[in-house]
Amino acid sequence: MSKLLPLRAVRAATLAATAGLFLALASCGGGGAAAVVAAVGGGGVGTGGTGMTFGTVIGLGSVIVGGTPYSSATPTYYSASDSADALQTNSQAVDLGARVELQQIDSSNQPQSLVIQPEVDGVVGSVDTTTGTLQVNGERVLVNADSGKGPVTFYSGFTGLGGAAGVTVGTQVEVHGAYGEDASGPYIWATLIERLPASSTLSRLTGVVANLGATSFSVDGTSVPLAGTVIQPSGASLAGGDLVYAADQGGSWVVTVHGLGTTTGPVQVDGVAYAIGSQGFTLSGIPVDTTAMGASAPALVEGQYVVVSGHGDGHGTLVAQSIRTYSASNPATVELHGTITAFVNATSPFLVRGVPIDASAASYAAGSSSSQLGNGAYVDVVGTVSGNVVTASSIQVLSSAPTGETVDMQGTVASVIDPGHFLLNWQTEGGNRQVTVTIAPNCAYANGSAGSLSAGAPVAVEGLYQEDGANTVSAYTIRFLPTGGSSTSGGSSEPQDISGRVYAWSLGSAVTQATAVAAQDSSFSLEGTQLNILAANSVSIPAGFGDGVKVEVKFDPTTGNVLSIALDN
């Protein structure tokens, strides 16, 4: 419980900078839809910097990587797809446990870009629940359930490893994690295992370049042709021993060389230490020089998860200035800061920043209680990963979101003021609150576009809150929600919106028709919540629906019955 105040203190400097950023975003939000699109294409709106961070997302509110908070409002977001290695996406594509690279970070921890970088995509070939090991696309993947060793594996679209709703042989998955090597060879310490649809064609490997010849090379035993292969970043060349991400996009390979390049600015990297020697070790393919730390450098063991901060030497080496480790007394906890959505009751999972929270055993900070929980309530949550949920150990409920903090709001557009502003009827537990939304220059859209904004449109907005008495939010992500059902207050008895990856669908196979089909009595789960499709409710099931598919659902929280479904594009 007392841990909440130090956690907020760690974020103070970032929040102070973000509060100033809010004013900058708001002042240029009226540039119109064309200006918004142009800004998104040109990168984030941070002030620019030379810093770089690569690691695991262990918290959201800001984007928290390796215990350091970074602004979620400034970057342009990129992610891989079936057809490209880095397509533009939005902030809500960043999952807990995801591996990310933040670039051009300034002194206020405001990055200009964030790249979501999975390690492996493919079919599960084997699962050993005893050792916590699986094979994906031929690569060895290790899961972690001990927070005293480092980030615990988080599951999306699964409940865990094995079991009826867990990871099983033949499932298509995406794995995020830290590359390492041991006596048995290379492996990935999984920080996130995400279910993909059976129709997914994604195929990705992470490993070191071997057997480099005139026509091909290999990555963890898989041969990759040089002819037609795109090497990234631009101007990079391959060398034996380089750590690379190799994506097979329908027979055309894109290979990204991982490293610091000529970076001389501040660098933070977290992952698994291997090839440990007297002067340093290797971390995610990056040589780490510990000589400058002298006797303060901790004694590490092979496979230990660490967070290293320092600077690049301009030749690809990270010169370490500090090394943090995990232990039973310093476990890898999760922080979530934001407003509650999809709240049914305090004993059922609810969402904070899109992450399911089990608050049933949580302690509450002074002045806070479970009776204050509800849609729109701003909370600070500390907990640990348990399969596909975060089990909260402590919760603090604030009377309102502090200035500069991120909020998630669901509601309907009341009116469009001009191309850069609209009024939102934010559905909270206590009733509708009207909020003025300023569209930030780098605002990204999901399931629609700026032209889709109109009175009555149901939307989810992520943005920076301004505690100015006028309920103002600067939006950097706007997601359009499915229509159907109705909600007048947003309270826990009103229809709720929830998104995520489908799992445990009782019909057991995807809808393969090219068009939507009529409802069939069935059930499925999203983010720890079981939902029911009733034929009597005449709910249309969209084409392609099935386990692993990302969807947006409106449902009745009193019954769990689905009111409408839309695929999340």
Image (tube, helix red, strand yellow):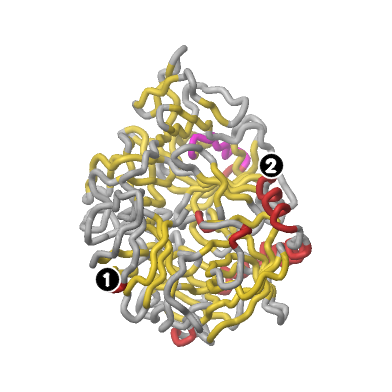
How far from the left and from the top, in percent, is residue 2? 52, 76
544 relative position to 476: left or right: left
The number of numbered badges drawn on the structure is 2
In-front residue for pair 330/216: 216
Q: Are marks 2 and 1 in contact (CB under 8 Å)?
A: no
Give the quadrant of residue 24.
Answer: bottom right
Query: Which residue is found at the position 41% from the left and 27% from the top?
Result: 251
Q: Is residue 289 magenta?
A: yes
How far from the left and from the top, in percent, is residue 147? 39, 59
Secondary structure category for the residue under label 1: loop
Task: Check disc 1 and give the amino acid type.
Answer: Leu
Secondary structure category for the residue under label 2: loop
Task: Check disc 2 and give the amino acid type.
Answer: Gly
What is the number of the mark on residue 524?
A: none
505 relative position to 276: left or right: left
Which is more foreground, mark 2 or mark 1? 1
Rendered position, 479 above or below 263: below
- Distance between the alpha carbons at the discs numbered 2 and 1: 57 Å
Label 2 sits on residue = 265
How far from the left and from the top, in percent, is residue 304? 42, 46
Write the start and end of the magenta stretch as one range: 284-292
Query: Which residue is found at the position 74% from the left and 65% from the top?
Result: 26
What is the number of the mark on residue 534?
A: 1
Q: How many neighbours does mark 2 have within 10 angstroms: few (below 14), some (14-19), or many (20 or more)?
A: some
Q: Earlier in the sequence, mark 2 or mark 1?
A: 2
Rendered position, 160 above or below 87: below
Q: How many neighbours does mark 1 have within 10 angstroms: few (below 14), some (14-19), or many (20 or more)?
A: some
Query: Which residue is found at the position 63% from the left and 45% from the top?
Result: 103
How far from the left and from the top, in percent, is residue 191? 41, 51
Give the quadrant of residue 14.
Answer: bottom right
In-front residue for pair 439/254: 439
